[in-house]
Image (cartoon, rainbow, N blue to C red):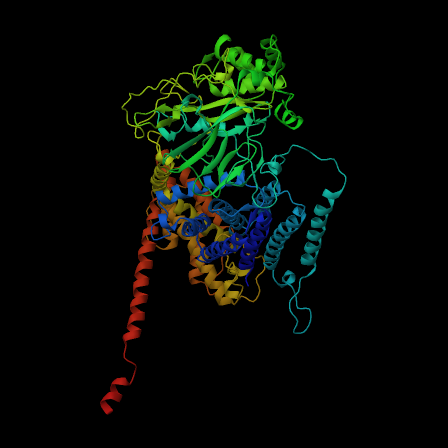
Amino acid sequence: MSGRARLTLCSAAATLLASCALLPLVTPATWLLQAAFLLAIQSGVGAATRRVPLARPLTVAAQALVTLALLTLLFAREHALVGLIPGPEAFRHFGDLLQTGTDDVSRYAIPAPLSDGIRLMVIGGVLVIGLAVDTLAVTYRNAAPAGLPLLALYSVAAGLSEGVTDWLWFLVAAAGYLMLLLAEGRERLSQWGRVFGGAPRGPGGQPGPVAPVRTGRRIGMAALGVALVVPLLPLPAIQGGLLDGAGTGVGAGNGSGGTISAVNPLVSLRDSLNVDEDRTVLTLRTTTSNLSDMYLRIVSLDDFDGTTWKPAKRHIIAVPDEFPSPTGLGQDVKRTEVTTRIAAAAGYGQDWLPMPYPPSSVQIKGNWRYEPVGMTLVGDHGQKTSGKTYQVTSLDVQPTAEQLASAPEAPGSVKSTYTKVPDSLPAVVARQAREITKDATSDYEKAVALQDYFAVTGGFEYDTEVEVGSGPGAIARFLKDKQGFCVHFSFAMAAMARTLGIPARVAVGFAPGSPQADGSVAVGLKDAHAWPELYFEGVGWTRFEPTPTRGTTPTYTLPDSSGEAVPDLPQATRSADAAPSTEPSASTSCSAQDKKLEGCAAALPLDPTEQDGGGTPWYEVAGWTLLGAAALALPLLPMLWRLRRRSVRLASAQHSASSPAGAPPGGRKNGGGDGRQPGDPAPAVLLDVPPQEAGEAAVGQVLAVWRELTDTAWDYGIEPDDALTPRRAAARIIRIAELDETVGRSVHRVAGAVEQVLFAPEPRAEAGLADDVRKVREALREGVGWTTRVRAVVAPRSAIRAVWDLNDRWTALKASWAARLATLVRRPSGQQGQQQGG
C-alpha cells in the first residue's frame, strides 16, 4: 500500500473512531455502520481524484458533491432527481429534518431515539468532519491541524454526555489521531529513501520500524497516558467553560428518552408571528358556554434565571387514558367537565399540543408524550400539530374569591421550586411589589393588587413595538417605561409574585378566539398570548390577566365575585356570517395592530412553507445565491486554470532542481506508486532510476518551463511563434518587451536549457529555471499598462490552451475507441484462407 493510500485509510479510521464518542448519545447504534459505509465512499472518491490528479480544490469539491449525493440518496431520494441529484424540494426536506433533529435533541434524554432528524445530524456531522480531516491530512498533506475537527467532534459528544466512560471514548479518539500522525510521519520518512524506510530485520524477514518510528510511537503513547492521568489529579478546575452548560442541557433520564427540555418558546414566538396578516391556526368546537375562559395552553415556563422564563427539564411518559387530578385542586371547588374538539391548520407546525387547562384526557393519533407536572403533551419522533384533529376533555375550574383568599400556605416542595428568584434580579422589582401590595392581607389580595396595577391603575400601555428585552434589568426597565405587551406583563407579575412568596409561573398559548356563525371558534395568530399562573393550595394553578385590553379578566378576581357570574364574551371583529376557517381571525385577545405581531408571539412557530407573505423561501434564496455565485465564478475559470497550470509547471521545475540528474519527482517509475500529484514535495533521494527515464523526465520539466515562459509573454501581448527556434524565440521576446540585459539572460538561460535537453546526448534539467521565469514575468508586468496587467491575470490569452487540450484529448479518445472497435471486428489472420481451403 502506498503512503498516500495508507494516509487516506488512517484519516477515515480516525474520523470513525472519534465519532464513536457519539454512541452513548443515540440509540440504536446502527447509524455508525451507515456512517462508516458513506465515509468509505467519500474517502475512496478523494483517493481516486488525487490519483488522476485533480487540483486540490477540485478534489475537495468532488468529495463534497459525492457526499451531498449520498445524503440525498439516504434521506431525500423521494424529493431528488433520479434519487441522487438534489433540488429545491430536497434541500427543503433537509431543512425540515434538521429542524426536527434540533427539536429532538433538546427534547429527549440520553440516549435519544434515532429519529430521522437526529440520524441526519449525526451521519451528516460525521461526513463533514471526515471531509475536513481528509482535506487537511491527505489532500493538503498536513495531518496536525486535522486534530481540530476531530477534537470538535469529540468535544460535542463529551459535552452532551453525562456518562462515566468519557475517558474511554477520549482514548479511542486520541488513538485514531495518533494513528493518523504516525501514518503521515511514516509517509514523509519514506520519501527519504531506504535509510528511514524500514530495513528488513533479517533474511526473509518483514520490514520493521526503525528508530524514528519507534520513538514516535513511544512519544505518542506517553502523551496519551499523560492526557488520561492528569484529569484525575486534584488540580484546580475552571468552571463555566464553553461546554459547561451543554452537559446539563438535555437533562438526565433513565436511558429511554424520558425527559424533555425544550428551548425557550418565547424565541420562536417572537420570530414566527411577525407577519402582515392574521391567519386562523386552530378551529374548535366546545361544550362550554363560557368562551371567555377558553384559553388554549401550550406550555408553562417555570424556570426563571433573571433574564428570561423557560420550561424546566421534565420527565415525560406515555399518554395516560385518564390524567390525574391537577395538583392542589380540592374537592370543594366547583368544576364542570368540558369537551373540546380542535382542528389545527396544515400550516401550524407546533411540537406542543394546545389544550384547555387543566386537561383530563386527550384523544389524538400520532406519537405524543405526556409531561405530568405541566399537564402538557409534546410530539415524539418529530410529531407536530400540523393538520391534526383531536379531542380534549378538560375541567372548567370555578373557584370563588373567598376560597382563594382563605387558601393555606403552599406545600414546601411547591413553594421552594416556584418562588425562586435569582440574585441578579434588581431590588426595585421586589421593592415595588411590596409597595403595590402593602394593604393586602393575603396572597390572593396581593395577586389581585398586582393584576390591577398592571391592567388598570398603574398607567401601563400595551405596545407591540417594544422589544422583549434581555438581561437582569429587563423587568426593571419595563416597570419604569410602562410600555410593553403580554410577555412583559406576564413576566413582571410572575417575578413580583415570587418575590412576595407566591408560587408563580408563566403560561404560553392562545387567548379565547372569535366565535363564528356556525358555532365554531376560530383562533388566529393575533390570539397568541402569555399570562401568569399563581398557585393556591386547594385550587391549584390559577390564571391571572395583567395585560391591559387583552384576554379576559378572571371572574374570581372581580369585586364581590361568587365565581358564578359569566363575563361578556370577547367582541369578534368579524361579521356574524363570516367564513369560519378559510379567512384569518381577528381577535381582540392579543394585538390591536395589523402589522406588528411581536407581542404575544413566541411559543407558536408556524410551518414556514405554509405561510403566505412570509418572505422568500430559504431554498429559493439559496438557489439564486448559488446561481449568482456560478455566474461570478464562470468568468474566473480562465484565471483559475492559468494559476493552476503555472503552479504545476514551476513546482515541477523547482523540485527537479533538488533531485539528482533530473530524477523524476514522485518516483512512479521507481515502483513507488505513492500517487503524488504535481506540486507535491518530491523525495530528496530516489534510488535506482534508469538514466533513460531520468532524461525523459528532464525533457518534460524543461519544456514545461519553456511553455510557461512563452505563455506568460503571450498573456502580456507577445504571441508565440512556434516556427522559431528557442534561441530566436527568446530574442524576439526580449526585443518586443524591451527587456534589460539581466532579464534577457534569464530568457536565454531557459531557451538554452530547452536546446540542451532536446539535442544533448544526456539531457539534464538545470537548477533555477523557475526563478528565471518569475523574473521574466515580473519584468513583463512592469513594462505594460494596468489594463494589460489586469487582463493578463483575469483573462489570460494563453488560457485558450485549455480548449486546445480538451480538443486533443477528445481526438485521442475517439482514435483509441476506433482502434479498439477495429480490433474487435477485424477477421483473425489466416481465417479467410482456411475457409477457402475447406
Direction from residue 288 to residue 123 in the image, left or right: right
* Residue 349 position (above or below residue 147): above
The residue most toward the right is: 234
Residue at x 57%, y 13% (from the top left corner): 445
Nearest the viewer among 534 and 5 is 534
Residue located at (50% from left, 54% from top): 34
- Measuring from the top left, give residue 202's x and y in whole percent: 69, 71
Q: Nearer the viewer, residue 648 or 612?
A: 612
Left or right of 651 on screen, residue 582: left
The answer to whether one can see residue 438 in this image is yes
User: Residue 520 location, x and y as percent?
Assistant: 34, 28
- Occupied quadrant, residue 812: bottom left
**Would you say residue 659 is visible in this rendering?**
no
Extreme bottom residue here?
Answer: 838
Residue 747 lies, with reference to residue 326, above or below; the image says below
Residue 331: % across, % down: 56, 27
From the viewer's side, name the closer residue of 697 and 629. 629
Please tell me which residue lies in front, 417 or 183: 417
Q: In which quarter of the image is residue 593?
A: top left
Which quadrant, please, contains the C terminus?
Answer: bottom left
What is the count of numbered marks?
0
Q: Which residue lies furthest to the front in this view?
A: 332
Residue 623: % across, % down: 35, 39
Quarter-wise, where is residue 780 in the image? top left
Q: Is residue 269 above or below residue 44?
A: above
Q: In the picture, which quadrant includes the N terminus? A: bottom right
The reply, left or right, for residue 440 in relation to residue 63 is: right
Residue extending furthest toward the left: 836
